[in-house]
Amino acid sequence: MVADERRLTATPLVLEACGLHKRFPGVHALTDVDLRLASGEILAVIGENGAGKSTLMKVLSGALAPDAGELRLDGRPLRLRSVQEALARGVALIHQELMLAGDLDVTANITLGREPRRFGFLDRRAAEELARRHLGELGLEVALDTPVSALALGQRQLVEIAKALATDARILIMDEPTSSLSATEATKLFDVMRALRRRGKSIIYISHRLGEVRGIADRVLVLRDGANAGELTAGAIEHDAMVGLMLGRCESVLRERAPRTHGPLALDVRGLRTAAYPTQAVDFSVAAGEFVGLAGLVGAGRTELLEAVFGIVPARAGTVRVAGRDVPRGSVAAAIAAGLALVPEDRKRHGLVLEQDVRANVSMVASTRRGGFGRRDRKAERDSARRAIDELGVRTRDDRTNVRTLSGGNQQKVVLGKWLAEPELRPRVLLLDEPTRGVDVGSKAEIYRLLDRLAADGMGILFASSEAEEVLALADRVLVLREGELTGVLGRDEASEEAILRLAAEPRASECSA
Amino acid sequence: MRTTESSRVRRFAIAALLVLAWACSASEQGADGKTVPRLAFVTNGVASFWVIAEKGARAAGKATGTKVSVHMPAEGIADQKRILEDLVTRRIDGIAVSPIDPANQTELLNATAARTNLITHDSDAPDSKRVCYIGMDNYAAGRSCGQLVKEALPDGGQVFLFIGRLEQDNARRRRQGVIDELLARSHDPARYDPPGQPLVGESYTILGTLTDQFDRAVGKANAEDALSKHPEVDALVGLFAYNPPLCLAALEQAGKLGEIVVIGFDEADETLRGIQDGTVYGTVVQDPYQYGYRSIAVLAALARGDRTLLPASGFIDIPARQIRAAEVDAFWADLRAKTDGR
Amino acid sequence: MKKILGILGLLIAICVFTSVASPYFLTAFNIENLLRRSALFGILSIGAGIVIMGRGIDLSIGSVVCLTGIVTPWLLTEHGWSVGPAVVVVLGLALTLGVAHGLLITRLGLQPFLVTLCGLLLYRGIARGLTADQTQGFRGEFAALRHLGNGRIPVPGSDSFALPVPCLIVGILAVGAAVLLHRTVYGRHLLAVGSNEEAARYSGIDTRRVTTVSYALCSLLAGLGGLLFVLDVGSAQPVDFGNFYELYAIAAAVLGGCSLRGGVGTITGILIGAAVMQVLRNMITLTDWIPDTVEYAVIGAVILAGVVVDELVKRWAAARARNLADTG
């Protein structure tokens, strides 16, 4: 605490929040929250699912008005009535859910809202100049006139960051900026953050990746149940300490576990060519009760592979067999009938119907298989929704709550619940695409435990993740992809972060010599 | 390889399109080549009245050896303008049109008359350079309808009028004829009583006039509303072909069929059946079949340079007839004979 | 440019087809007529396109056309106004209606479909009530003003052909709209709102103002279109003047490459889309073998076919690009 005080008096405070309260119907989202941010400081804000991080960020960026409490900018009281106002005062929020206009090109997005003008018209050259400069800082090389919708997810994230940089904001609020970045892209982003810090910018950084927090943060503010749970400064920022403050108890998320026993072949994929990488034929299999990790950088083709197996994007060639029976190519219904299930990467767009409640979402898959002259069995729907809530530990008021209001981790549990709600309809093989993206530590641990239990019950699991840590901890085998090519399969004892990276990274040397 | 193939496909598609277009243009010429005059019959909207006229026009086309096209503008005055322009573009040999708004269409009609033989039917545009007008004296027809009302209600009574729209000259005059006859006024086709307030005469009162703008649903609602607003009404007079059936439908719904008498215009099936059943006292019929037939006959003669069919007055009268219970069977049989087959 | 190739191809195909099928298609008289009609509908379509690019919809266009088409001659002939004030009042009225739509949609959060559907009913009803359903016309007067709608500008070197005045007007409007859309901050913001409204809002854009302005522009253009329509035709009937025009305008905009999901569209494409509709109807009247009664069916079928072919070509091109990328 002494070190903390000294630091704060040495550098002036730019932003202060005192006694913030925010109440939503049924939820006390923020209770007496304090936050201080010094100039040239990277402050990490961490906390469990529903701890109030998102609400706090919305208050700081002007998107929400607090019910009580005060904000101070440079020591003077600050009342933010809108995002515009916050931007004008130098506070910019970088959203986790990408806030980009997909039809507009890269330049237009980066300069959106503050377009350079000349004689009242758009100054395209100046805009491109600006865009090029900020993309250069992030090391992203894309054509400036590419529509953003044509970019990969990781690239879009970098455009979003470049957009915030272009505002010349003094305070940047980053909401899980690395959740869709590969390790190299994330490293580059941290370099940028450090450079910004040297230039006197202040950054509030929200992440669930505690390893990253340890590497980059000057100070960590921990929230729990909508209130301050404690702070850690430089030397004290350690994994266990953070988890301890977040959960209020000490618990290791990734426990050592005994090797699993595998059953017969559950999923067998031969010569699969995806539409995105039609030149690469991929062969692999997953046994019943086996946990297979799918690793690779952003753009390695993990999502495409899973979507081809599941039939959403029909494969160009190849066979998919589940429990020895061929699954017709390109039919999701057939894939589900055969016993496949997919938890998609973008849960808000592909995993959930955000406008509907938990019950409707959970019963969506089961209802298509129930038949009965198209009649919905309301009682069965209610029961399965309640069962899913109980078994998966979804934190929601009841099964009629709109899923939009749930936090990321709880939404993900609802997506899982969709597939697991009916015991007799459970899939043989569960395909998961980045299931812990944007999910806090507590929920992560719950999801890990759930998957572990499912594998123990004999379900085959194929798990794509860009977090090497979790792949290593969970998987019996690791498949590594690079640009659609299966570059290696690592057994449990050969798998390591280095081994994965070696297979996943581009073989630059050989390319030059060829 | 791929590009040559796609360009081949494209070339084939274009060739096929052109052959089709050529075939279509060839068919337009007709068997005898270019000597067949092409004539057009243009209405003022879409109605069953015009379907009978179309039959007359087509029968005349067959009789005179001409090629007849019939056009019913579905979107009002701008649509009629478009049709006339396109017909003129086609160098059509003659057009018979029922102008929607004669007072403001003079320019268009004159431009059309400058390029082809133009006659008006059903509704006249006396200020334009049309060659002649084929139709009925609507004022006289209106008075004749008024006579039927008097016969139906010899002791006087209260009357409600229903009509498609009042923008058209023919509609105004027709309505005025009924009013003037009931109020025992002098013969003056130029008189106009705006709708709205009741018109009270010695023994007859006109409670009001409602327009429906060719919308049948509105027409029926009008009749229903008039019945609920004026339960004391003695007769409903439907002045456009479809109005009497709508009046009958509204009366049936109100359970007042036969209690309140209907007097109609034109020869819708329901109207004629109503006369047979006694729910309609009578109707005044125009002869749309003759409008179509005479229009094309005159245009065919004009196209061949024969002006003998033109009267000096520029007006070919197709008089209206009164149809009561006594006349209805014979009239209906004749109508069926005329409309049987095209 | 690539986006309008499909619709341009459709227009050319219909023109080539009709010119072979009818010897009268390529006459100066017919071309003038088509240019004038396309120009008049083009004005409405630009407005519809602007709203659609901002991910809105305006169903009231036809009724605004009716209202201005009725009120203009009504003020001039029935009330003896002079031309200047009448035109200013009529266009001001249209602008006001558009602003009202925009405010109801953005401030009260009502759905655009609902607001403009009510507009559709409201303005036609007002026009009919105002005039007791009587036709409003110029009665052969106001020739100078009517020149704006039906006038022709002589083209040097040609006796038979002259450029219809509405073409000049739509040309100016199109250039203005294209500049607005692609060279001004407002246009950029409109496309951003259409593409992702939330993103635009979080970028500090006053999305409510952007949307309101788009509806205001749409109604203003509809009002101007109605004015020119009535100047061309000479009179208007409250009951059916401008009926369905909103659908023609929306169809032209969508044919011209505007996505109903917002965010994309070009003015050139919209104008070509408007022309396609007019040439189609012209084709049906000029060639005898399609009865007028199936006109709507033909228009619907051709538009649908155009959209289907466009989609197939896009997929084919995407597949080819992928194959080339694989082998290259």
Image (spheres, rainbow, N blue to C red):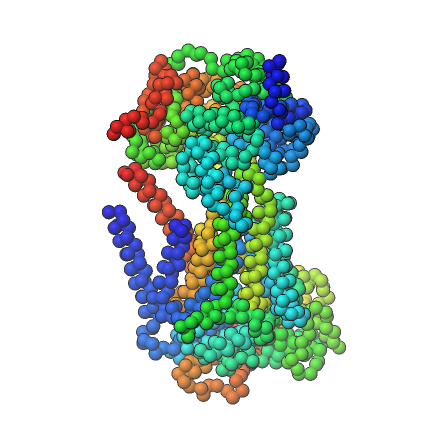
Residue C162 visible in the displayed image: yes
Where's the C terminus of chain B, which quadrant? bottom left
Expressed as whole percent of the image width and height from the top left, the position of residue B69 reads: 43, 71
Q: Is residue B158 above or below residue C116?
A: below
Task: Residue at 53%, 46% (x, y): give it.
Answer: A117
Expressed as whole percent of the image width and height from the top left, the position of residue A216 reads: 50, 21
Q: Is residue C266 above or below residue C166?
A: above
Closest to the observer, A411 or A175: A175
Q: Is residue A6 left or right of residue C44?
A: right
Task: Residue at 60%, 71% (x, y): give it.
Answer: C137
Considering every residue shown, the one lying at the far right of the view is B202
Q: Is residue A448 above or below residue B340?
A: above
Closest to the observer, B76 or A184: A184
The answer to which quarter of the image holds residue C289 is bottom left
- Number of marks in picture: 0
Closest to the observer, A277 or C126: A277
Task: Residue at 31%, 58% (x, y): give it.
Answer: B14
Q: Is residue B150 left or right of residue B71?
A: right
Task: Residue at 49%, 53% (x, y): give it.
Answer: C179
Q: Is residue A291 above or below residue C125?
A: above
The answer to which quarter of the image holds residue B307 is bottom left
Expressed as whole percent of the image width and height from the top left, the position of residue A112 reads: 52, 41
Residue B341 visible in the displayed image: no
Considering every residue shown, the one lying at the far left of the view is B1
Q: Is residue A180 left or right of residue A407?
A: left
Expressed as whole percent of the image width and height from the top left, the position of residue B121 reads: 52, 77
